[in-house]
Image (tube, helix red, strand yellow):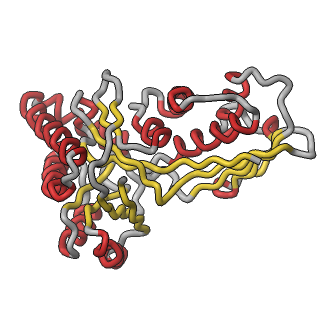
């Protein structure tokens, strides 16, 4: 049997402005992960057991565009495996689905590495990342590549559209509390609304995007320099700019205010907005009490993660 695991991810800075050529910054969330176990099977076929998505089936009974099936088919084609081996595959994940935490990319990366190890097919991190990006394209059209890169390397990523993604180091660890509003984030809708604002006043909104870009750039330098104490103010600045872009919501604002009142150094939405997650930068010893306050204020779930 071979086993592999891949972490989740969260966007720290630069949402929405990244669409307009400004930098975004994302970090791994190692407290949640996808896990894949692959072993030889005594029964013919490739059997998939993924209880989190209620999938228990043999590969050939699934449509080829089913997400897990497409990873397996594409991997076997890439590795030129013929005939198909008899395998038992088990996939579990503690990453909430469709929550902006990179669950799809994490399943792809974990499953790809487990299959490669089981079938003695050597893959570098770069090759795993490129393969995962191709899978992301099947389901997201023109993805940024942030999810698969953060998940593959389990390192922070600095991304500017049209440029090579940069992996960078954390000078000193810092702690985040992630809280889920419980409301599905309508990313396509919020991105469309921002575009309409921009179309009506390009010069004005370009200035806002510039400010978000400056925040992301400064945040990267602070993280690399081991100065997480500087991030709280930057997180709050980014949130104020996102509110201007109309992508926050009463539920997000309430959780953000709750986190700040409970002692967070800074708090903001993460991802598309109008639902989904918010993040709070906290002192490690405050994480538990801030998580409790967020749950009391309506958060459906919280995750505490240490960015290393």
Which residue is at the front of the view, 61 or 68? Answer: 68
Residue 42 position, x and y percent, is 92, 46
For image coordinates 12% across by 34% down, the residue present is 210
Residue 192 position, x and y percent, is 29, 36
Quarter location, residue 161: top left
Residue extending farthest to the right is 43
For image coordinates 84% across by 33% down, the residue present is 85
For image coordinates 39% across by 65% down, the residue present is 304
Q: Is residue 277 above or below residue 247?
A: below
Quarter location, residue 134: top right
Which residue is at the front of the view, 228 or 60? Answer: 228
Residue 202 is left or right of residue 65, and the answer is left
Residue 181 visible in the picture? no
Q: Is residue 151 above or below residue 304?
A: above
Quarter location, residue 72: top right
Residue 211 visible in the picture? yes
Which residue is at the front of the view, 289 or 50? Answer: 289
Give the tally of numbered discs. 0
Residue 66 position, x and y percent, is 66, 37
Which residue is at the front of the view, 26 or 3? Answer: 3
For image coordinates 43% across by 27% down, the residue present is 142
Residue 42 is left or right of residue 89, and the answer is right
């Amino acid at each position: 049997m071979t086993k592999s695991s891949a972490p989740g991810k969260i966007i720290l800075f630069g949402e929405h402005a990244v669409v307009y050529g400004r930098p975004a910054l994302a970090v791994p969330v190692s407290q949640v992960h996808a896990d894949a176990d692959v072993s030889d099977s005594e029964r013919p076929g490739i059997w998939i057991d993924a209880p989190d998505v209620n999938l228990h089936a043999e590969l050939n009974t699934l449509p080829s565009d089913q997400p897990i099936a497409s990873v397996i088919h594409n991997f076997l084609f890439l590795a030129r495996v013929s005939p198909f081996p008899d395998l038992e595959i088990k996939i579990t994940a503690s990453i909430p689905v469709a929550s902006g935490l990179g669950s799809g990319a994490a399943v792809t990366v974990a499953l790809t590495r487990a299959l490669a190890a089981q079938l003695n097919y050597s893959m570098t991190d770069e090759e795993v990342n490129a393969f995962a990006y191709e899978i992301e394209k099947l389901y997201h059209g023109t993805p940024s590549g942030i999810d698969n890169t953060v998940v593959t390397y389990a390192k922070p990523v600095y991304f500017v559209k049209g440029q090579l993604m940069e992996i960078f180091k954390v000078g000193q660890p810092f702690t985040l509390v992630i809280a889920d509003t419980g409301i599905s984030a309508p990313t396509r809708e919020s991105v469309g609304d921002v575009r309409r604002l921009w179309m009506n006043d390009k010069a004005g909104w370009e200035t806002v995007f510039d400010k978000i870009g400056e925040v992301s750039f400064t945040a990267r330098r602070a993280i690399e320099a081991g100065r997480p104490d500087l991030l709280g103010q930057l997180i709050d600045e980014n949130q104020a700019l996102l509110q201007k872009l109309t992508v926050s919501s009463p539920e997000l604002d309430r959780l953000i205010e709750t986190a700040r009142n409970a002692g967070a150094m800074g708090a903001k939405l993460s991802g598309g907005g109008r639902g989904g997650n918010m993040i709070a930068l906290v002192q490690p010893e405050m994480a538990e009490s801030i998580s409790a306050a967020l749950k009391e204020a309506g958060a459906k779930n919280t995750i505490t993660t240490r960015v290393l």
